[in-house]
Image (cartoon, rainbow, N blue to C red):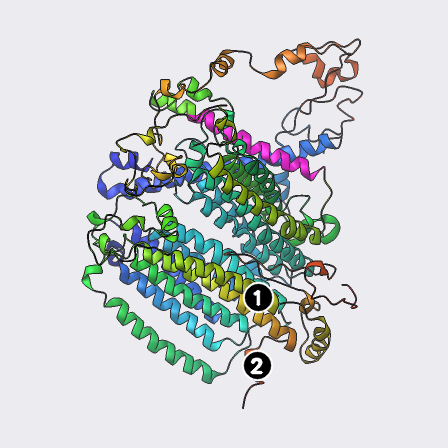
């Protein structure tokens, strides 16, 4: 018997978890369970990144995606929660159309995935790198404009792109600033509207948390976004749009 | 035991990416909760990241020098950053919508219809 | 460790070597995490008691009650397992383990001595922050799954607080990373080798300020007072932990203490020199791996003791803060983070950045106090540099070459305790830049400051002071008859009118 390739065992573990959690996100009824299935899926993808030797990227995935974006989504779920927390079911017709389209896409993608050229086929055991290669400094230098890993590259085709990723970094920084300002503006409190809307909404469907629509929220900074919520209305100092609130404080 | 003895290549990661992409698309198609749709978007972007990292990994191919090496990781990094930004804005829009309509059901968002 | 095991086994059993190495690392870390949590629980009760002018546990486990955590644990294990009717059962059961798992996994990247780290990653700091951010999800899960409004409110407040304080914490963590030039915790601590002046906290005033901001953010991250409104008894019963009892609550409790230990450890490595003490005893005595394996082991053990002492110092400070300061309101907490800590941390970062251009060797060394030892990594042949060494054609400014360990990192070995330390120094080179006065101080045997000071305490009439403590002075049997007055130290029982039966031990 050949020796078990433990890299493969770990890969199947993480891949199975990722795909299973992805299917669970689709099939879950409860939105909060969907959110935590998403956590499992993103965590498994981070594990796949670690297995592929991208430790910085795996840590980034955990920090930004799992610890930031999913927390943001869960805050959104809690802020917009309604009494039936079960996801509203969609019609069978939509399910049929969705499954047919997804099956076609899955077939296409699998065919492309399995038709990978033999030059990028799986490695033999003797061809693997000796140890985990340090990528952090190289990533840092590439973001600053120097591709330190390509300095000794003999192949001229692969030597292209020596200027690194400085311009995309700057564009991403400005983009994040714009997003920060935009999200803060979009999600600001609009007190003069919400109480009427809430009453109309309550007549249609009772809400789980009665003052959830009144709580302000705004996005956080750079790569880890945070939404701060508080049931106290008293913190109008840093959220108000300038108008005084004469509604009762909860 | 056969699949466990073969070495893992790029194709394995691409299959995982494909499955995640399809799950994300199914989420976007079938969820009536706007936040469910956002979760589908996150799954799609993660599938893309898995593909990028797979092409850039020296552990998954026979000729490590011909992988796109750090480009894969850097592109995946930018995708992560931009996805987080987009999730923030999308959540702000959903909250705005909730403030105005007291529901996050996307089927009810039909004011511009017809 | 894995490499040594694989050299003993034939290739088809290599996986066993890696499995054993992994299990040994995991067992050691788990033992440490649980023991640290238990000792922290005992410390909390004793320190809290002393601050409140009482004794604390004195019955279980001898005179100082050091087995009290065991008694607490046994009591909690015997409690009834209650799950509220409105709770989401699966998520309710899973939440404590998610929090504890995230907290425990941060121990993977902490180096306890030179080469003694479970995961010698190049991006260790980043991984620590990433895993620490996963606790928030466990907290939200716990709050939601309890099916109670108090729990949900407490969980959302706690999540908002922790997520908001990650930002100034990350900014403060970036400052020593910037000074050291690497994200690897082992190398950051290696660069602080030597005397007290090598510690990064004394490098420039901006790092000094950043250290205190980091301490405050660490306290907020672990939800300890004065930032513990989410679990305040007077407000929300127990926040997200309201519906948890018995063993599940034990897991949350231990996760909190494990997190305190871990963030203290991170602060110790980044700012306080990690496993290096104020005096480099191991180097002066020649306890290094290049002298011999046993000497290296002794030196590393000394370093581990040093590191764990610093972690417990941080824990004691957090306990001290809890029982001294009043609680902050949630809007005060958020104001502090967004309006004060983030601008201050950014200012510290900017100041430190500019400082590196002005005085690149740090405040103390620029005026000649203390010298960093010559390291083997800047040898001419570059034999210890990795494959990513920069060619000489790229002329970087001098301050980029100041820390050769960060730039020309030795190759990282995956899951191995290094047989050879990351750099080797000749002992004469190591002491070349140390001042003769410091060497003389190191030769003095009775170097402990309390020794001579205590002999001078005779200002209290009728009092006798000793340099040791005679047994009859602290025996509880003689408590009522003791005639000696002592300077009260918080580790010894008070010998006034308190007899054993009337001691308030809790």
* B47 or C297: nearer the viewer: B47
| Rendered view: C176 above or below C457 | below
Classified by dominant secondary structure, the portion drawn in magenta counts as helix
Q: What numbered label is drawn on residue A90? A: none
Chain bearing tag 1 is A
Residue drawn at x 79%, y 68% is: A246
**Quarter in which the C terminus of chain C is drawn:** top right
Q: Quadrant of residue C216?
A: top right
Disc 1, SS = helix
**Image spot of residue C380 (x, y percent):** 28, 30
* C200 or B48: nearer the viewer: C200
User: Does any portion of residue C249 appear in the rendered image?
Assistant: no
- Residue lying furthest bottom: B114
Q: Quadrant of residue C263?
A: top right
User: Does any portion of residue C64 appear in the rendered image?
Assistant: yes
Q: Quadrant of residue B96?
A: bottom right
Disc 2, SS = loop
Q: What numbered label is drawn on residue B109? A: 2
Chain bearing tag 2 is B
Magenta region includes residue A183:
no
Q: What numbered label is drawn on residue A183? A: 1
Residue drawn at x 67%, y 58% is: C153
Q: What is the span of residues highlighted in magenta in the rendered image?
A: C300-324
């Amino acid at each position: 018997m050949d020796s078990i390739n433990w890299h493969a065992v770990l890969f199947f573990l993480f891949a199975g978890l990722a795909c299973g959690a992805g299917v669970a996100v689709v099939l879950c009824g409860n939105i909060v369970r969907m959110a935590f299935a998403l956590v499992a899926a993103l965590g498994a993808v981070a594990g796949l990144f670690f297995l592929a030797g991208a430790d910085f990227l795996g840590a980034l995935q955990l920090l930004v995606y799992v610890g930031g974006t999913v927390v943001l989504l869960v805050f959104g779920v809690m802020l917009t929660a309604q009494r039936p927390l079960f996801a509203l079911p969609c019609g069978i017709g939509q399910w049929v159309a969705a499954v047919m389209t997804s099956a076609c896409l899955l077939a296409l993608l699998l065919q492309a995935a399995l038709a990978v050229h033999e030059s990028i086929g799986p490695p033999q055991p003797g061809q693997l790198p000796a140890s985990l290669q340090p990528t952090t400094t190289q990533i840092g230098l590439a973001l600053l404009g120097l591709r330190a890993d390509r300095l000794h590259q003999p192949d001229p085709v692969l030597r292209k792109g020596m200027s690194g990723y400085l311009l995309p970094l700057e564009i991403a920084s400005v983009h994040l600033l714009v997003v920060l300002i935009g999200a803060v503006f979009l999600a600001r409190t609009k007190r003069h509207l919400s109480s009427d809307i809430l009453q109309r909404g309550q007549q249609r469907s009772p809400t789980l948390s009665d003052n959830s629509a009144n709580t302000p929220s705004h996005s956080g900074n750079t790569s880890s976004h945070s939404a701060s919520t508080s049931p106290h209305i008293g913190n109008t100092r840093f959220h108000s749009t300038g108008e005084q609130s004469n509604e009762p404080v909860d | 035991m056969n699949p466990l003895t073969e070495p893992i290549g790029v194709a394995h990661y691409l299959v995982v990416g494909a499955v995640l992409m399809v799950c994300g698309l199914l989420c976007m198609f079938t969820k009536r909760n706007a936040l469910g749709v956002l979760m589908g978007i996150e799954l799609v972007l993660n599938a893309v990241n898995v593909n990028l990292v797979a092409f850039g990994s020296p552990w998954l191919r026979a000729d490590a020098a011909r992988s796109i090496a750090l480009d894969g990781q850097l592109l995946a990094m930018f995708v992560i950053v931009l996805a987080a930004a987009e999730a923030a804005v999308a959540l702000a829009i959903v909250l705005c919508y909730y403030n105005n309509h007291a529901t996050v059901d996307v089927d009810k968002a039909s004011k511009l219809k017809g | 460790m894995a490499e040594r095991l694989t050299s003993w086994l034939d290739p088809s059993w290599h996986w066993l070597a890696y499995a054993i190495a992994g299990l040994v690392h995991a067992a050691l870390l788990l033992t440490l995490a649980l023991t640290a949590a238990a000792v922290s629980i005992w410390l909390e009760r004793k320190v809290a008691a002393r601050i409140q002018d009482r004794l604390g546990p004195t019955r279980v486990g001898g005179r100082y009650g050091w087995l009290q955590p065991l008694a607490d644990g046994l009591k909690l294990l015997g409690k009834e397992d209650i799950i509220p009717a409105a709770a989401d059962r699966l998520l309710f059961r899973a939440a404590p383990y998610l929090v504890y798992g995230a907290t425990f996994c941060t121990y993977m990247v902490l180096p306890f001595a030179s080469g003694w780290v479970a995961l010698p990653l190049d991006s260790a700091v980043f991984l620590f922050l990433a895993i620490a951010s996963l606790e928030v999800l466990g907290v939200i899960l716990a709050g939601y799954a309890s099916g109670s409004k108090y729990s949900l409110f407490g969980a959302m407040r706690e999540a908002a607080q922790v997520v908001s304080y990650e930002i100034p914490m990350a900014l403060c963590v970036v400052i020593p990373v910037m000074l050291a030039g690497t994200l690897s915790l082992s190398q950051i601590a290696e660069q602080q080798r030597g005397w007290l002046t090598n510690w990064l906290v004394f490098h420039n005033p901006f790092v000094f300020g950043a250290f205190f901001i980091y301490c405050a953010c660490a306290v907020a991250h672990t939800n300890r007072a004065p930032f513990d409104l989410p679990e305040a008894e007077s407000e929300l019963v127990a926040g997200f932990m309201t519906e948890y009892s018995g063993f599940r609550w034990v897991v949350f409790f231990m996760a909190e203490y494990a997190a305190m230990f871990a963030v203290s450890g991170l602060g110790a490595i980044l700012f306080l020199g990690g496993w290096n003490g104020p005096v480099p005893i191991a180097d002066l005595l020649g306890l290094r791996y290049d002298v011999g394996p046993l000497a290296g082991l002794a030196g590393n053990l000394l370093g581990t003791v040093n590191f764990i002492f610093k972690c417990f110092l941080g824990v004691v400070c957090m306990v001290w803060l809890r029982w001294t300061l009043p609680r902050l309101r949630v809007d005060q907490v958020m104001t502090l983070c967004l309006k004060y800590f983030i601008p201050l941390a950014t200012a510290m970062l900017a100041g430190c950045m500019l400082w590196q251009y002005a005085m690149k060797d740090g405040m103390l060394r620029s005026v000649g106090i203390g010298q960093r030892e010559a390291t083997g990594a800047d040898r001419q042949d570059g034999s210890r540099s990795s494959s990513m060494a920069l060619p000489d054609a790229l002329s970087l400014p001098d301050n980029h070459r100041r820390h050769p360990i960060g730039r020309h990192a030795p190759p990282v070995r995956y899951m191995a305790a290094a047989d050879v330390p990351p750099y080797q120094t000749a002992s004469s080179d190591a002491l070349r830049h140390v001042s003769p006065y410091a060497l003389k101080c190191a030769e003095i045997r009775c170097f402990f400051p309390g020794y001579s000071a205590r002999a001078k305490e005779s200002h209290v009439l009728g009092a006798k002071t000793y340099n040791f403590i005679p047994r009859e002075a602290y025996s509880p049997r003689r408590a009522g008859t003791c005639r000696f007055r002592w300077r009260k130290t918080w580790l010894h029982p008070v010998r006034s009118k308190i007899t054993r039966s009337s001691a308030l031990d809790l």
